[in-house]
Amino acid sequence: MSSEPRMLMLHKPKGVVVSRRDERGRRTVYDLLPGWVLADGWVPVGRLDQDSTGLLLFVKEGELVERLTRPGACPKTYEVWVRGRVTEEHLEAIRQGIPSPVGLLTAISVEKLGGAGPKSRLRVTLDEGKNRHIRRLFGALKDPKFATPLKVVELRRTHIGSLALDVASGSWRLLDGREARELLGAK
């Protein structure tokens, strides 16, 4: 038996919950995966809320979850669409940190990629993820024209460390040994 860490990548679609089962009957990530994933005790590394999409890792070894989710251990990058006009002042405020009920929310990098009308497209990288981190970050800021809170309307995780999302929505694949080793070496 190989001593290589075993990891699996899933492209989580919108509307699917990160849970083994759901009392409200919603689809779970395990509905998208082969039965052996649940039967063999594979667990997700972190979470993505129901409205978010993108890269979600699964591992069989519980200690890998702790290693990969420890603050500062493995940066996570997201592509975000925000309703409202995001200014350079907003980006600087995010870099400095936004106070919230769950503590100071920051991003290690935030970059405006463009926009369309009243929406802004950004790339945000976090080195720790608090509950609804990115949604809270932008929700604490106001559109300069309308003085209404900015609102995240799409959020997709594109990278975890050096690993890029490369499967279609709802699809999965096993990581090869090189990918797993690189990911565990990401600091």
Image (tube, rainbow, N blue to C red):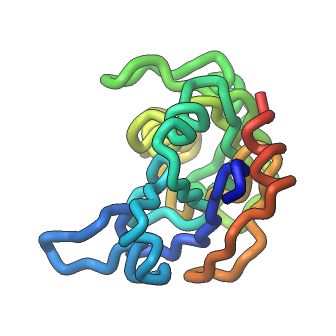
105 horizontally vs 110: left or right: left
Residue shown at 31%/23% (left/top)? 101
Q: Is residue 172 above or below residue 140?
A: below
Residue shown at 35%/67% (left/top)? 17
Choose between 187 and 141: the one closer to the eye: 187
Q: Position of residue 16 (x, y in %)?
A: 39, 73
Q: Is residue 180 above or below residue 119?
A: above
67 horizontally vs 140: left or right: right
Count of all numbered marks drawn on residues in the image: 0
Which quarter of the rendered picture does the N terminus lie within? bottom right
Q: Position of residue 90 (x, y in %)?
A: 64, 32
Choose between 167 and 123: the one closer to the eye: 167
Which quarter of the rendered picture does the C terminus lie within? top right
Residue shown at 80%/56% (left/top)? 177
Q: Position of residue 61 (x, y in %)?
A: 51, 47
13 horizontally vs 17: left or right: right
Q: Is residue 152 above or below residue 103?
A: below
Choose between 159 and 91: the one closer to the eye: 159
Instruction: Specify whether residue 142 is in view.
Output: no
Q: Position of residue 172 (x, y in %)?
A: 62, 76
Instruction: Specify whether residue 50 is in view.
Output: yes
Q: Is residue 43 above or below residue 126?
A: below
- Looking at the rendering, which quadrant does residue 53 occupy? bottom right
Residue, far front: 1
50 horizontally vs 53: left or right: left
